[in-house]
Image: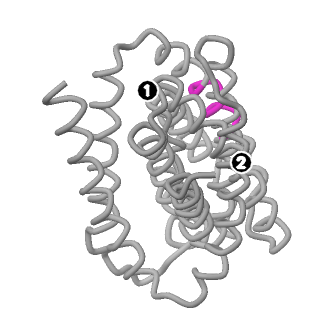
Amino acid sequence: MSIPLILAGLITGILLGVFGSGGSIITTPALLYLLHVEPKSAIAMSLGIVAITATITAWQHWLRGNVNLKITAIFGLFGVAGTYAGALIGVITPVMIQLGVFALVMYAAAWKMIKPQPQHKSVGAAAVGCPGGYCDELRYGHIALHGIAVGVLTGIVGVGGGFLIVPALVLLSGLSMKQAVGTSLSIVALKSFAGFAGYAGAVAIDYRMMALFTAIAVSGSIAGSLLSHHLPADLLKKGFGAFLLLVASYILFKSVLFN
């Protein structure tokens, strides 16, 4: 078992445990550049690793009452359809385009992490007219549309989409941050399984490496859940954003601009 695999697995799990997102953003570059997996195989394996890790972490959040199953079902159902379609597109999409889009998505995620968040007088369900965290049909329609859009992106570039799902859940459904993280993990798990199914059989997959990576990531996710209670959330978000900027720039430099 290599040191890069151990480090990448731990970081993947920690990010999922702390933020409910970010797993694939670490997993895919790690498989590509540290473990030297072919690009399309790396995207497929990343989806499988995140699917299993997110499932276990979401279950832990569900035990604490931090998963909204109704929103999971709506966002997840449409997200799964979008992810499967995106994965079929990803199989025939040139690698340069996949990696270029992936880098741009990472820049967008970094901006969301680093950008100062506006302060609102009221937060949660009441702020968006959703008493008790349950929104009307119009808002659920918006959630479904966002599920499709994020799902397609997930399938094409192997990104779980949690960093887009969490703010969407807070703004559209009025969930608290804790519930948004837990619900995001359950949605990411569904979409990642669908994306993996779209790639399975179409690209080569090293199941042994994937199993080892997943086992380490699960351990990291448990550590991440504990870590989130002891470190300032704002510091973690900004540090993660800075790291994303570095990795995205490296991908563009090495694999897109100078391929």
Q: Earlier in the sequence, mark 2 or mark 1?
A: 1
**Magenta span has 194?**
no
| Relative vertical location of residue 74 with respect to residue 15 in this rendering, above or below | above
| Relative vertical location of residue 32 with respect to residue 8 in this rendering, above or below | above
Q: Counting other residues with Cα less than 10 Å from the Cα at mark 1, is it few (<14), some (14-19), or many (20 or more)?
A: some
Magenta stretch in the rendered image: 76-83
* x and y percentages locating residue 154 in the rendered image: 51, 34
What's under tag 1, amino acid-wise? Pro
Counting labels gives: 2
Residue 72's disc is 2
Q: Answer with the quarter of the image where residue 246 lies.
A: bottom left
* x and y percentages locating residue 127 in the rendered image: 50, 71
Q: Which residue is mark 1?
A: 39
Q: Are marks 2 and 1 in contact (CB under 8 Å)?
A: no
Farthest bottom residue in view? 230
Q: Give the camera-side residue of 206 and 97.
A: 206
